[in-house]
Image: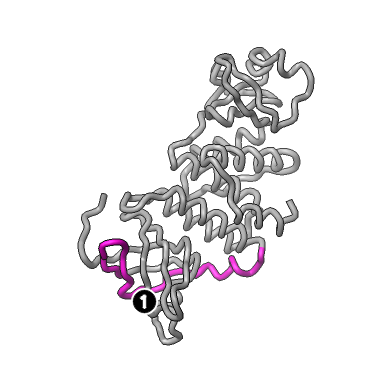
């Protein structure tokens, strides 16, 4: 935890805004050193406020803050990046809203969050640039943020035999964060998978516990390994297409939402505007 001083400076990205009265705004700001901060920005909505650009959703800025008993107060802010490209499409804005809501929930006040802050910035920049498919950005963020939050799955190899090659129908155990190769999955669940089982149908593991699987093809497995093990600065530099893209998106979303324990209205809205 960073040392607490009455007035301090920090870079941060705005994850959420709530208007208060006619001129004020409450901000949720994610910072590398201080984690998530609640910031009361008095008078920031006045047209003459020099800090107004930094008090917008998705804004990345240098903040000068004063600590209070319940939250921080904004002294001033200098904008670094507004990510204007995000608002260029309703789909981009909807996706960024969902990802920021997830980051808001998974961040902790007064706990340093450099990796999460960097992931959010990289993601917003990528969405704003519009050069990567949104399903790539969304899935990569979901799996990486799950890992940062402590839910990283072990996708190095099959949890039973250790084989790195899991075949065309490898399976990701969503609930336990483990990988099964095609052979071991069929061996353990042969009675339950004697006929095709829909993807959303839970099975029962060797201990009688309910488990939920998502199919992992070689292409999907390469993507998951890249997301979890690569340099964070190259988080989105991979491709996954066709059926693999559908399986990838479903696996990443299902994995994150299962471990969080609920869905998001912003996700539902994003899916509606994307026609998913």
Q: Position of residue 233 (x, y in %)?
A: 47, 50
Q: Where is residue 239 in the image (x, y as percent from the top left)?
A: 65, 45
Of all residues, the one furthest to the right in this rendering is: 195
Query: Which residues lie in the magenta part?
Result: 64-90
**Left or right: 51 in relation to 199:** left
For residue 186, say whether it is visible.
Answer: yes
Would you identify the image quadrant in which residue 242 lies? top right
What residue appears at the point 69 percent right and 33 percent down from the top-left corner?
200
What residue appears at the point 43 percent right and 62 percent down from the top-left corner?
13
Of all residues, the one furthest to the front in this rendering is: 21
SS assignment at label 1? loop
Q: Nearer the viewer, residue 56 or 133?
A: 56
Characterize the local packing of mark 1: few (<14), some (14-19) or many (20 or more) Cα atoms within 10 angstroms. some
What residue appears at the point 61 percent right and 29 percent down from the top-left corner?
172
Above/below status of 140 relative to 269: above
**Left or right: 184 in relation to 234:** right
**Left or right: 193 in relation to 11:** right
Above/below status of 226 relative to 62: above
Residue 48 covered by magenta stretch: no
Q: How many labels does the image show?
A: 1
What residue appears at the point 61 percent right and 54 percent down from the top-left corner?
265
Task: From the image, tell me which residue sits under label 1.
Answer: 42
């Amino acid at each position: 935890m960073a040392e607490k001083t009455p007035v301090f400076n920090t870079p941060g990205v705005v994850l959420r805004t709530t208007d208060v009265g006619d001129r004020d705004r409450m901000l949720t700001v994610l910072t590398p050193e201080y984690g998530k901060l609640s910031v009361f920005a008095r008078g920031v909505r006045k047209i003459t406020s020099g800090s107004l650009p930094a008090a917008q959703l998705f804004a990345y800025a240098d903040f000068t803050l004063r600590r209070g008993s319940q939250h921080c107060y904004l002294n001033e802010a200098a904008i670094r990046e507004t990510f204007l490209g995000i608002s260029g499409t309703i789909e981009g804005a909807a996706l960024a809203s969902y990802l920021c809501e997830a980051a808001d929930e998974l961040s902790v006040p007064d706990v340093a969050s450099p990796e999460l802050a960097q992931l959010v910035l990289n993601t917003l920049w990528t969405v704003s640039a519009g050069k990567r498919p949104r399903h790539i950005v969304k899935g990569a963020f979901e799996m990486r943020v799950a890992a940062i939050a402590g839910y990283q799955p072990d996708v190095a190899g099959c949890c039973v035999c250790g084989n790195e090659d899991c075949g065309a129908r490898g399976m990701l155990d969503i609930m336990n964060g483990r990988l099964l190769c095609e052979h071991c999955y069929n061996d353990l669940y042969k009675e339950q998978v004697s006929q095709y089982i829909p993807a959303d149908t839970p099975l029962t593991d060797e201990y009688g516990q309910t488990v939920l699987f998502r199919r992992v093809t070689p292409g999907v497995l390469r993507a998951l390994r890249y997301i979890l093990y690569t340099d964070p600065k190259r988080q989105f530099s991979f491709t996954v297409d066709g059926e693999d893209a559908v399986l990838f998106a479903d696996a990443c979303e299902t994995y994150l939402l299962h471990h969080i324990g609920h869905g998001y209205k912003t996700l539902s809205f994003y899916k509606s505007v994307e026609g998913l």
